[in-house]
Image (spheres, rainbow, N blue to C red):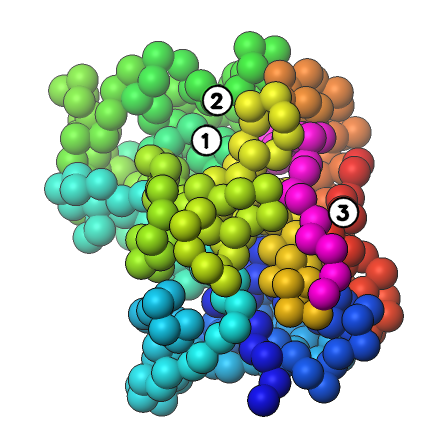
């Protein structure tokens, strides 16, 4: 019977885990002995880092031809249960039927979910750009604004959270509103952050650039205030201030996919499983974790991979390789990704590119924008469905470095 590598998820980590696993099996000449299966609702890789944009076409490229080219099967469905003691998962198929699937090696690459605390009205009256379906809902809503009465609430967008997604959404939003409401509509874009400053995760130098850019884009800041409640007419802040708005966009963080909780082991505050250097889930045999569900050290200096495609792509390559290597007798590869960069789209102002965990500013405005465009339209997209070309960039130590 063929050994079976099962991968849950076809995002950045899952896609690259599949290609890397197929490469390792091919290197060992054991394609007839090992089968690789990816389970996800559809054979698509959603380009989540771009979902804040207005134009969301080609944000979910079809990877079925690529998987076919490297000899990986895709099953349309969702893993709903993980039974690590039995080396088995339950898959809910597109037809609604649940079927068991056995594995010899399992790679959890299910990604992350938007953090949604129990704030009154959050689910009913806010939008987000966490998944493609949500981004489409927001775009449809924005396009419908001209049909509403021209009130201050119609012309005001409030964005909750000033992480990378919140910043990029805010920088882009003024142009999106002007495109549908016109330049004379009295547009307001307000960025709300509960910390004492926007972008608290950024270095002081990087934050200064972001503040300058958002200021030129006309974005207002409300800091030191959390979201208390949301209703159909606007938002209440913990400071007691109310802002009338028809469009509230929630961007306040992410948590590991709920499936991670089904795997025994230590979890961090984001729900990620603590992984060893080869991305095994601690304390569980034959399970690897990767992408947004893995807490993995990226170097020997105390830094850990973030929930980002930058890290997910490398984590996926390592997890896929190691899952296959244990079956075909190849050496394991320890995950290491000491170089860290940030490239932040700042709308019509340009962009910001930093290097290092201390976020030293390297490029700004048009130079950074050109690099950002290169990254988001080329580098993070899946390769062409060519076996050898895909394998050439699927080795576990391959890292794209700007």
Q: Which residue is mark 1?
A: 163
How far apart, in angstroms, are the residues tagged by discs 2 and 3? 28 Å
Which of the two marks, 3 or 1, is nearer to us in this view? 3
How far apart, in angstroms, are the residues tagged by discs 3 and 1? 29 Å
Does dot 1 land on a helix, a strand or a loop?
loop
Of 110 and 121, nearer the camera is 110
Question: Do we see residue 51 in this rendering?
Answer: no
Is residue 267 depicted above or below 217 in this figure? below
Specify the quadrant that holds the N terminus.
Answer: bottom right
Extent of the magenta region: 329-348
Q: Residue at x 35, y 12 (%)?
A: 196
Chief secondary structure of the magenta portion: loop
Q: Is residue 346 magenta?
A: yes
Q: Which residue is mark 2?
A: 201
Specify the quadrant that holds the C terminus.
Answer: top right
| Mark 1 neighbour class, 10 Å CA radius: few under 14, some 14 to 19, many 20 or more | some
Question: Do we see residue 23 in this rendering?
Answer: yes
Q: Is residue 226 magenta?
A: no
Q: Which residue is mark 3?
A: 397
Left or right relative to 236: residue 179: right
Residue 317 % position (x, y) = 67, 55
Mark 2 and mark 1 in contact? Answer it, CB < 8 Å: yes
Dot 3 or dot 1: first in sequence order is 1
Dot 2 or dot 3: first in sequence order is 2
Q: Residue at x 25, y 20 (%)?
A: 225
Is residue 309 depicted above or below 41 in this figure? above
Residue 143 % position (x, y) = 43, 56
Of 15 and 272, nearer the camera is 272
Does dot 2 land on a helix, a strand or a loop?
loop
| Mark 3 neighbour class, 10 Å CA radius: few under 14, some 14 to 19, many 20 or more | some
Which of the two marks, 2 or 3, is nearer to us in this view? 3
């Amino acid at each position: 019977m063929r050994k079976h590598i099962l991968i849950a998820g076809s995002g950045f980590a899952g896609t690259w885990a599949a290609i890397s696993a197929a490469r390792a099996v091919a290197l060992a000449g054991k394609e007839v002995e090992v089968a690789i299966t990816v389970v996800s609702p559809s054979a698509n890789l959603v380009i989540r880092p771009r979902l804040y944009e207005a134009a969301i076409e080609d944000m979910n490229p079809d990877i079925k031809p690529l998987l076919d080219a490297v000899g990986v099967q895709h099953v349309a469905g969702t893993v709903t249960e993980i039974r690590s003691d039995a080396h088995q998962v339950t898959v809910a198929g597109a037809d609604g039927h649940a079927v068991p699937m056995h594995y010899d090696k399992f790679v959890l690459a299910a990604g992350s979910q938007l953090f949604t605390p129990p704030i009154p009205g959050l689910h009913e009256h806010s939008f987000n750009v966490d998944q493609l379906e949500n981004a489409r809902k927001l775009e449809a809503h924005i396009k419908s604004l001209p049909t509403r009465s021209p009130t201050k609430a119609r012309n005001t967008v409030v964005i909750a959270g000033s992480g990378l997604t919140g910043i990029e959404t805010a920088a882009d939003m003024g142009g999106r509103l002007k495109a549908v409401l016109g330049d004379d509509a009295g547009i307001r874009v307000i960025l709300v952050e509960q910390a004492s400053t926007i972008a608290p995760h950024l270095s002081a130098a990087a934050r200064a650039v972001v503040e300058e850019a958002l200021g030129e884009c006309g974005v207002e800041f409300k800091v030191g205030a959390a979201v208390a409640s949301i209703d159909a007419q606007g938002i209440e802040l913990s400071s007691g201030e109310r802002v009338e708005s028809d469009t509230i966009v929630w961007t306040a963080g992410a948590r590991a996919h709920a499936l991670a909780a089904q795997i025994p082991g230590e979890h961090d505050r984001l729900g990620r499983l603590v992984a060893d250097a080869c991305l095994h889930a601690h304390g569980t045999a034959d399970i690897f974790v990767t992408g947004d569900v893995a807490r993995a050290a990226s170097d020997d200096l105390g830094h850990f991979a973030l929930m980002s495609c930058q890290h997910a792509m490398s984590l996926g390559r390592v997890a896929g390789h190691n899952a296959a290597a244990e079956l075909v007798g190849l050496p394991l590869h320890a995950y290491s990704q000491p170089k860290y960069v940030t490239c932040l789209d700042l709308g019509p102002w340009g962009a910001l590119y930093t290097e290092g965990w201390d976020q030293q500013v390297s490029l700004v405005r048009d130079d950074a924008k050109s690099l950002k465009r290169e990254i988001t339209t080329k580098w993070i997209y899946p390769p062409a469905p060519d076996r050898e070309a895909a394998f050439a960039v699927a080795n576990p130590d391959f890292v794209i470095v700007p």
